[in-house]
């Protein structure tokens, strides 16, 4: 996961399974650039959605675990 911001911002990262259940959540305070390789090896195979929210917007990414 890569997040870049020009100013300090708070982010909430949530991963939900295909049924809408939260399986991962993290609150971040980013000032500049943030990079983290999330470990999803414990997740069962299937489709997940990563939701990254801040005060200014939201981004949703689909993840496929095989």
Image (spheres, grey):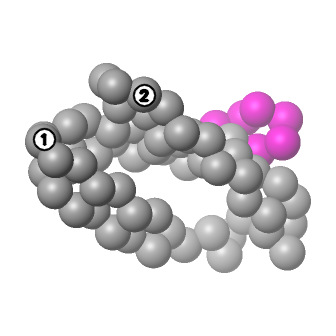
Q: Which residue is mark 1?
A: 8
Q: Which residue is mark 2?
A: 57
Q: Specify the segment rendered in magenta.
A: 17-23
Quadrant in which residue 33 is drawn: bottom left
Q: Which quarter of the figure is the C terminus placed in?
A: bottom right
Q: Is residue 48 above or below residue 38?
A: above
Side of 7 where 61 appears, left or right: right
Q: Is residue 30 magenta?
A: no
Side of 53 where 62 appears, left or right: right
**Is any atom of residue 33 visible in this view?**
yes
For the point 42% across and 28% down, the residue is 57
Q: Is residue 26 above or below residue 37?
A: above
Of residues 22 and 61, the one drawn nearer to the viewer in this rendering: 61
Mark 2: give few (<14), some (14-19) or many (20+) Cα within 10 Å: few
Q: CA distance from mark 2 to mark 1?
A: 14 Å
Quadrant in which residue 2 is drawn: bottom left
Side of 8 where 5 appears, left or right: right
For the point 38% across and 70% down, the residue is 36
**Image location (x, y in percent) of residue 65:** 79, 68
Give the label on residue 19, or none.
none
Q: Earlier in the sequence, mark 2 or mark 1?
A: 1
- For mark 2, give the secondary structure: loop
Q: Is residue 31 above or below residue 65?
A: above
């Amino acid at each position: 996961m890569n997040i870049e911001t020009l100013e300090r911002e708070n982010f909430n990262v949530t991963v939900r399974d295909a049924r809408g259940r939260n399986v991962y959540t993290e609150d971040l305070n980013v000032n500049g650039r943030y990079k983290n390789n999330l470990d999803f090896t414990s997740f069962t195979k299937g489709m997940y959605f990563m939701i990254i929210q801040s005060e200014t917007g939201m981004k949703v990414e689909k993840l496929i675990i095989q």
